[in-house]
Every structure is written in C-alpha cells, then in structure tokens.
Amino acid sequence: MELPTTEISEESLDPQDWRALRQLGHRMLDDMFDYLQDIRQRPVWQPAPADVKSRLKKPLPLEPQPLESIYQDFLENILPYSLGNPHPRFWGWVIGNGSATGMLAEMLTAAINSNLFGGNQVGSYVEAQVIDWVKQMLGFPAGASGILVSGASMANLVCLAVARNSEAGFDLRRQGLQAAPARLVLYASRETHSCIKRAVQLLGLGDEALRLIPVNADYQIELDALRETIASDRWLGLRPFCVVGNAGTVNTGAFDDLQALAELCQQEELWFHVDGAFGSLAALSPRLRHLTDGMERADSVALDLHKWMYMPYEIACALVRDPVAHRNTFAENPNYLARAERGLASGSLWPSELGPQLSRGFRALKAWMLIRENGINKYAGLVEQNVSQAGYLAHCIDAHPALERLAPAPLNIVCFRYNPGGLEEAALNRLNQELLIRLQESGAAAPSSTTLGGRFAIRVANSNHRSRKEDFDALVEAAARTGKQVAEEMAL
Amino acid sequence: MELPTTEISEESLDPQDWRALRQLGHRMLDDMFDYLQDIRQRPVWQPAPADVKSRLKKPLPLEPQPLESIYQDFLENILPYSLGNPHPRFWGWVIGNGSATGMLAEMLTAAINSNLFGGNQVGSYVEAQVIDWVKQMLGFPAGASGILVSGASMANLVCLAVARNSEAGFDLRRQGLQAAPARLVLYASRETHSCIKRAVQLLGLGDEALRLIPVNADYQIELDALRETIASDRWLGLRPFCVVGNAGTVNTGAFDDLQALAELCQQEELWFHVDGAFGSLAALSPRLRHLTDGMERADSVALDLHKWMYMPYEIACALVRDPVAHRNTFAENPNYLARAERGLASGSLWPSELGPQLSRGFRALKAWMLIRENGINKYAGLVEQNVSQAGYLAHCIDAHPALERLAPAPLNIVCFRYNPGGLEEAALNRLNQELLIRLQESGAAAPSSTTLGGRFAIRVANSNHRSRKEDFDALVEAAARTGKQVAEEMAL
C-alpha cells in the first residue's frame, strides 16, 4: 500500500449543510412544477444561441462549485434550449412527454438508488409485477418471461438475440455464428424501424441477413413477397429463422397483418417477433385492439413505456414467450455473483439473467407507481384520444385546399405537406422543408419529417398526453399560413 | 377511422389539483432527505417478509389510485427492503451510493425529460462536455470519441462491437460474421468480468472466441501465456483481433500490466480494449494513477460513473480512440431521422450514431452537475480514501488471529475469511457462508462473496463515499464475533 492506512480522511458526498441543500432542493422542485404547469405558455422549442453553447464549454472542474450557481446555469442555459417534448405541440419523431408524477417517481428512484441486478431485494418483485401487468396489457401469456430495458432498440435487440440463439440449430452462444452450417436470415418490411437493422448488425448477422420485404399501399408487409422470399432463401440453402412484424411503423403508424404473420411463422417454423415500440399499446383500447390481433401469438414483443405510456425516459420492455429460451441467452453465474440460500445474495429473481445489463437501475418503480396512479383505463383513453386527434388532423388536412395528406393515418401519425397545386415535386420538397423549419423555429409546433415515395412529408406523431384539439387547429392554421408565405418568398 | 374525430376527450396526465401534487412532492422530497441524512441509523439491509412480497402482488390496476396511498405503499413496503447501497456499511459486489444532489439532478432530468438521440438541443452539448471531461480524467486523447450508456456492460459491448467491426478485415456490418474467412478470437484474463463474455456472445462471436488466459499470484494476466496463445491461434489459422485488459478486476481489484498489453497489442496489431468499470478511476489520484499506466494507449475504454463516481444509476461511458471507427459501427440515417440545416433536426451532434440506443435519456445532466458540484479533486480524494480504507481493513484482518486475507488488496477490494485454524477447507467454506449471511441479516454490514482457488471469501468492495474508519472496525469486530459463534454452533 502506498496510501496511508492509519490517518484516513473522512470526507463524503453528503452536504456540509443539509438544511441549505434541502432548501435548494425544494426550490428546484417548485421551479420544475412551475415549468410543467405553465409549459403551454412557452415556445415548443428554440435553438440555443451560439453564446449559450460556448458558455457550456468549461475546463475540467477541479474544485467544487456552488450548487446554486450550477442550478442557475441549468435554468438559464439548458432548460430553455432542451428538446421541448413535454410541450403540448411537440409531435416530432415518436417521443413521450413524461409527467409531474413521473418526475417524483424518478426522484424516489434516485434516492434509494437500487441496483436491480438481482439478489434479495423487493425491487425485483416490483419489476416482476410490472412485467406481469405488461403481459396482461398486451394479452401475452402469463407464463412468458420479460425484462425492463432502456428503450425499444434494446428490447428489440434482446428479443432478436433470443431468436437467433434459439433458432440457430446449434450452440451459437458457445460456438459463434462462424460455426453456422447455413447463413441465418430474417425478414421484415421496408418500413421497419432502423433499430432492427442495427440489432442485426450488432448480433453479427450483417445487413445482408435482413431481408427487407416490400409493402402495400397501406404500408403493410406484402405477404406474398414474404412467402416467396422465404422459399427462395431456403432453396438457396440459407436458414430463415425469424420474421419481424410491425405493430405501428415509425413512418405512418401502419400495422402489418400480425395474424397472417403468426400463421405464416407457425407454418414455416420461424420465430415471430413483433416490434411494438409504441403501436403495441393500441391493445389497451377495446376500440383499437383489433389492430394488434395476432401479436399475442408472437414469440417475442418489444415495446416502449416512455412513448405511448408517457413515462420519463428510459423505460421499455422485452417479452419472450419461452422463458427458458430467454434465460438461456443471457444467464451467467460467475463466482462473484454466487447465489445463497439466505441473505442479500438469495432471492429467486435475477433480472440480470435476462438481458445484457448487470448493473440496472430501478426503472420498474416509476412504472409501478404511474400505472397504479393513472390506471389502465386512463392510458387506454389517452391512446384513443391521440388516435382521434390524429384522425381529426387528417380530416382538417383533407378539407384544406392547400394541404395534402401523403399517407394513410391508421393510428397516431399523420404525414402531410403544403401543396397549393401546380408545383413540381422538387419545388414542393424544398417548400415543405423550409415550412417545417419555420414551424419549429417560430416555437409554434414541433413535428418532424420523413420521405414517402420521394416526397418530403411533415410528420406529426401524436404520443402527447397534453395535446388538445386547439393545438391541431393551430398547427393547420400555421402550416397553411407559413406555407403560403414560403411559397411567395421562394417565388414559386 | 373508427374513433370519433369531432368530439374528442381532452384528458391529460397533468394533475387535477396541482397544489395537492406539489404538496405531496415536497413531502416526498423531505422524506428522501431524511432517509439519506439518517441512513447511518438504519440497518444496512433487511429481507422483505413474505407478507410484504405478497402485498406487492396486485391485479392490473384499471382505475386510478390515490398517489398518496401508492407513496405510502412505497414507504412501507419498498423503501425498507431495498438493496441498501446508500448505506455506509454496504460493500457488496461493486455498487455506488448515489447522493442527495444526484437525486436532485435526476428530478430535473425527469422534469425536462429530454430524449438525447440527437437533433438541435443543448443536451447534446452537455453530453459532449461530459465526455470531454471523462477523456481528461483518464488521460485519453482529446480527439477520441465517446458516448454515455447505461453501465459498463453496455460500454464494453459498444467498444467490443467497434473492435470487431474495425478489425474483421471485411465488411462485417454488411456481410455478417458468417462471411468471415477466419474465426475471430480475442483475449482476456480469467479474472475478467462476465460482461465481456456476455458481449462476446451477443456479438455472435461465441464463447469459444474468448481465450481466457491464466493469471499470476497478483491476479494479473500472464503475459507469456497470452503471447503464446496468440501465436498458436495464428498458427491454427484463426484471426486474433483484440486484447481486453483489466483496470481493476471484480474479484480482487487487480490491474493487468496495461503498459505491457499496449506494447503487445501494438506489436501484434490488435485492438487494445480496457475494461475500467471502476478501477480506471484510480487515474484521478496522483498517488494511484500509476496503476492505470498504459490505459491512455488503449483503443477503447469502458467505465462506470455510477460506481466510483457515486452517481445515481444508470451512467457509464464508452471511449473509442478512433472516432471514425466508432461512428462506422453504429451510424444509420433513415428517412424519419433526416438531418436539416436549421430547426429541430439540425445540430452536428447525434449521440445515437455512437451506440445501440436511439431514444436516450439525458443522463449527461447529472454528470455535468455533480462533477462541477464536487470537483475532480474531491473525487480523487474519495477514491484515495476508499483505497486507504481497504488498506486499513486488510491491515486489521492481517493483525487478527482468527481472520485471514485470501488475496492481495491492491485497490478497494478486500477478500478474507474467518479462520480460527485447524479446520478443513470444506468446513471453512460452510462456516464463512453462514458468517456472511449473518452479517447481512443482522443489518450490521453488507459485503458480498466470491470464491478464490476454491476458498469461499467474504468480499468487501469499497466504492462507498459514506464509509468511515469506524465502519470497518465494526465489520472486523462483527466478523470475528459472529465467526466464533457460528463455529461453536456448527460444533467445528
């Protein structure tokens, strides 16, 4: 030892003055309540000015700085220039709002700061309870296995890892993909989210293993094309192992025919995985549930709780029908994680055996609190509300002479553009790009964009519990007015 | 549309009564301050009684429940039976405490609830700043790339994915491992953490690709054995691509000779990765930094900030020397993530291009606040304090006639057992298993265990900013007293 062992400093990260920190904490909490309560009065988003960005650039802090001034920095330089997704007119990508109660749940989580790797702690039971609820919400079998993870990207990765290992036909976990007698291939529609591609890459399968199948006019996977591709791959000596179905695509909210995919996977003896990042939660509503028909037959489902359940980031869930396959993909038992019959290292629930994380935060706590606080019927109502609002927006666009819808809107996503008529596609694309940016820069609304068949689309994804009818009216008005203005400026 | 689009409900998750929620929030905050301030008075840990576990089991909540009663449930049934890691005598596995300020930072994070996937938001600059600081903390080159992730398991996975793709010698991302002309293999010592094995499995390389090299008496990788294995693998036609060095092993806190490994990797043209989950932070201390010599030459480093920086779960960092290799492993650019010159989808920093997550929480905020609040010198002092305390504990054990140290303690981990002399190894193992459980069940202290050369060891991993000398005195006293008692009961 080179360090002293007799005279040891006894510092800690506890405050010198608990009273002062407590006071500041209460002020922060009040400020955050104010922020959330008055958010409708703020611009949705504003870009950080250059001087704010440069003010954030600081040398490595060696000495302590007063928390008060750090917090002031947060209030002045971070809060106003954050993404803006708690706002009622934020509809970019697919992003949830969070909530005031979600904030409180995260505060409690950080206070007890549990590491949910396993062991004998009550958090494991809370997580198991949440997973049981998720299974019931989705109509998934009670015997299925599940784990809470950071987001749908991770949930899809977990599910596809289990699919890969279970369906490989040899001990892939031990021998690796290089020992495979035939190349493993899987299938998904062209509208499938890029996280599936990324998972396939990470799993070592390579992009070429992912067969992207065309879609029909409703952006659903073409079943005939899928069947033909599987047959031709088998003929070529490849080993098909999985089909990924979409419960709500990211571009347009389309649902693949999950019932047909379940049937096909049964016939073809393939793993049936459903990416239900947000769309799977249509199952909560008796009026929308039919869209998810067949999802309950999947071998695995990935879904987010931070999108259409509006929970604070990060929380998602991977469900796997076969608990043994799930465990066999991830469980390890090294010496330093040995189990005991009693004590801290006992307990029958070790969530770290079901996913890539060993240290894991207690993300289950917010789900456990929020699902109870709101009740499933409330979430079902909000999902329906968001879908109704999207329908209302689609209707307003269809009724407007200068606005044009660019895709069906079966769920909560509406793609449209400003189109006064008589313009070339290229000009329309330029016009709408500028229009979208102005909507954002004005702070009026924050949709994002996509491209559908070469057409630039303003894309409104409504997973926002704060949006009201007036917000969509404001969007339509602003889009039409700004579109006209941009067209004039561009001298189109 | 089957849902109404004219008369739409206008519910939200905002409270009916903001005042009441605000009041409850302040009560929660006070309770959590009390919990942290008085934690020394609590038992470290206590098992949840059966009736608590069964009380947690509830049917899917359909209707709203009062938040007050949910919170009461948390206070009565969760808080007392949580893992206990904020406590000054928690030394199980390698787990940090969190802090009161960490709790506040998480509250702010959840309030603004930013999704740090990219786009034009100030959070991306905050994250970039934190990563720059981490590079400086570790003496890593300023031009390196980095990303914040959930934990070291994920950070190691990210780094090994980059290593695999960069060193494969073909377009692995596109073609997959099955197209590899030779089997890829990598190297690490037998003391390496199981997350490396798990990453290797997930990446499709298979356990067999991970060559586990023996260690010397100080639990460091045997360099000669490593060299020989690489040579023999090359002779066999395999393709060595990476060596994993340990900066602080999980069993004993050992450091591989990183300087020698860097040299070897340079000669052999292999990717040099360092798993520095907690041990890399020895670099903060001028007195301990020498242990990490050579780490600054690594191609990639994985480290946790929720362990030896005591931040709330989850936060870790992956650093990659070659930013192009890093980006090339993960970047995608689908239509719905298109970039713009201005507006919300502009911005040059897209962290989601550097890791497996698309949606990502704003975990950078807590790091940005806490590093500034405490200053690096404070962290360096606490790291030294923890190492000094471990040295003190080792000294007390060595001085005690009935306690025996089972491994060198070069850092913050001490492995020992009760050994009064004259007992068989099997009896000693049984005795110490029971002794450890009683330490935990009594609420006196919470070490965990490992097995070293067949011997069951009580393992104290000190990444605890609240521990004081008196806590280690109490541990030694309790271990000796309980050991004697167990030995008598077992009639040994």
Image: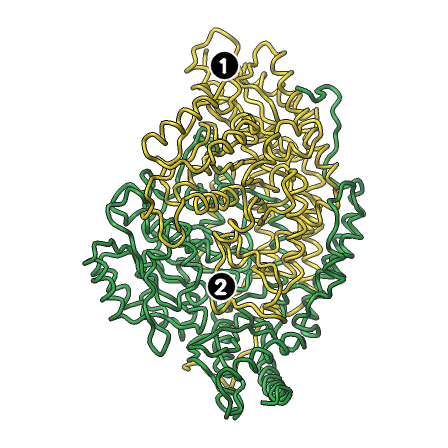
Chain colours: A green, B yellow
The spot of residue A108 in percent (x, y) is: 62, 50
The spot of residue B289 in percent (x, y) is: 66, 30
Residue depicted at x 46% and y 38%: B195
Residue depicted at x 54% and y 85%: A418
Q: Inspect the image, locate mark 2, and give the three-letter code of the amino acid beneath it.
A: Asn
Q: Nearer the viewer, residue B42 or A237?
A: A237
Residue B487, which numbered label? Answer: 1
Residue B333, which numbered label? Answer: 2
Q: Nearer the viewer, residue B222 or A164?
A: B222
Residue B313, which numbered label? Answer: none
Q: In the drawing, does residue B18 fall left or right of residue B196?
A: right
The secondary structure type at the circle numbered 2 is loop
Circle nearer the N terminus (1, 2): 2
The spot of residue B19 in percent (x, y) is: 71, 65
**Whether residue A349 is visible:** no
Q: Residue furthest top?
A: B422
Identify whether A409 is placed above or below A491: above
The spot of residue B153 in percent (x, y) is: 50, 42
Image quarter of the N terminus of chain A: top right
Q: Inspect the image, locate mark 1, and give the three-letter code of the amino acid beneath it.
A: Ala
Identify whether A426 is placed above or below B158: below
The secondary structure type at the circle numbered 1 is helix
Gap between marks 1 and 2 measured at Cα? 64 Å
Q: Chain of mark 2?
A: B
**Whether residue A398 is visible:** yes
Q: Residue furthest front?
A: B267
Residue depicted at x 46% and y 15%: B428
Q: Nearer the viewer, residue B58 or B451?
A: B451
Identify whether B373 is placed above or below B64: above
Image quarter of the C terminus of chain A: bottom right
Q: In the drawing, does residue A449 fall left or right of residue A298?
A: right
